Amino acid sequence: MDNNNLGKHISGQFNLELEDVRSQVMAMGGLLEQQLHDALHSLQTGDQDLAKKVMATDRKINAMEVAIDEECTRIIAKRQPAASDLRLVLAISKTTADLERIGDACVRVGRTVLETKGGSRKGTLVSMEAMGRHAARMLHETLDAFARMDVDAAFRIHKEDVKVDGEYEAVIRQLMTFMMEDPRSIPGILDVLWAARALERIGDRCQNICEYVIYFVKGKDVRHMDTDDMEDLLR
Amino acid sequence: MDNNNLGKHISGQFNLELEDVRSQVMAMGGLLEQQLHDALHSLQTGDQDLAKKVMATDRKINAMEVAIDEECTRIIAKRQPAASDLRLVLAISKTTADLERIGDACVRVGRTVLETKGGSRKGTLVSMEAMGRHAARMLHETLDAFARMDVDAAFRIHKEDVKVDGEYEAVIRQLMTFMMEDPRSIPGILDVLWAARALERIGDRCQNICEYVIYFVKGKDVRHMDTDDMEDLLR
């Protein structure tokens, strides 16, 4: 297993600094999981207060992104890391950017809930439940793979995204049917469509983070690589 | 003017390496401008071959992203830059990621053209022309601000994005009207909607790149900062 050789490369104060920034990423990830959970719950129940909480959390997420990225830059300037240490810092910085965008997706879902007053489009929202749960599970597993720098898990999650994409296509087809049956519902359903789109994008962000885990462990940038080539690399 | 103090900080071989990677970014930007131009032209004319060319260009763009990012990592590891040199390398790396996403937006537009056979939704596509031209101009000016590390231009372009957002809202309202008038057109118009969304996102990517220019010149991360605070910083 290549999954975790952090201990070999780093030591002392530098080690502490890297551990600290890693734990900041995990804290940010934890907050995001809660934010996504709240967003999905508000979507199901129409809870407007919860949706407002989701929107408010975004400020914290944004501040965490800036703080972690600043710390990464400081570490590079001060410690001048090379090889896998440098890859770790760069992977952390990029992961943080994708996590922040998952926060934006939660905000998009929250906004749809706030704009869907009276639960008139409840049927359309329910169609997204399975996809939402799937995206939440992918986020959870991605954070877990990141915490352990587990390249096998990262590859497995990476392949999982096609399923979220498939669920998304099904949701879009269903929303299209609703619109065609009742054209007056179109503006409201478009709001729901943006939320569906946002949830689907969470899967893409998780894929990106998995690519950074593979980059750190294997030293190879696998962005834009197809699944077969990635499998060859990891074998 | 704070716009360009590259020469002060770097010298010799390191200077050449930085210049080389900057010119790679400019080459990538030039290819993207052509790709966006082709995407918009194919949208106007329904030229399917041109749309296919747009799709094919994406591979080149992706490869450029990976190559530039690799070079940035190599420079950090080998040259151990600090202060503004480090900020420059990080700004380049982040800019490249946003440029690659502008390429994805062009692909999305190309796909809409390929799926819009026979020009049946020509009226809906025309509604996007103004927004497309605006996005293209924003990209051009952003690349220019990046080339000159011109913080004033970056701030000006950053503020410009609200106009693209406004044009986007108008396009969406128009597409909604088309859908309500003729529900059978809904699937086709949704394709157009994704293209409109992609063009709107180009403005957001340009905003991000402008933030990296400000970060390089001013040493301050302005992501998530509101316009007034940004103005105070730049004064």
Image (tube, coloured by chain):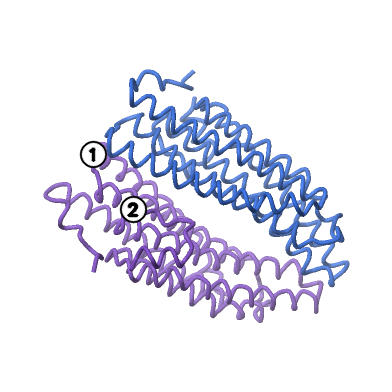
Chain colours: A purple, B blue
Q: Which residue is mark 1?
A: A80
Element class at badge 2? helix
Who's the residue at 55% across and 31% down the image?
A: B154
Same chain under badges 2 and 1? The reply is: yes
Write down the quadrant of residue A127 in the picture.
bottom right
Q: Position of residue A230 (x, y in %)?
A: 41, 64
What's the amino acid at mark 2? Ile
Element class at badge 1? loop
Residue A110 visible somewhere in the drawing:
no
Q: Nearer the viewer, mark 2 or mark 1?
A: 1
Give the chain letter at badge 1.
Answer: A
Who's the residue at 40% across and 60% down the image?
A: A211
2 or 1: tag closer to the N-terminus: 1
Q: Position of residue A174 (x, y in %)?
A: 69, 78
In this rendered view, identify the residue nearer to me: A66 or B29.
B29
Write down the quadrant of residue B38 in the picture.
top right
Quote the CA–CA distance across marks 2 and 1: 16 Å
Q: Which mark is residue B88?
A: none
Who's the residue at 40% across and 35% down the image?
A: B220
In this rendered view, identify the residue nearer to me: B32 or A183.
B32
Q: Which residue is mark 2?
A: A92
What's the amino acid at mark 1? Gln
Q: Position of residue A33 (x, y in %)?
A: 41, 68
Q: Residues within 10 Å of mark 1 (few under 14, many from 20)?
A: some
Give the chain letter at badge 2.
Answer: A
Q: Position of residue B130 (x, y in %)?
A: 77, 43
Quadrant that contains the C terminus of chain A: bottom left
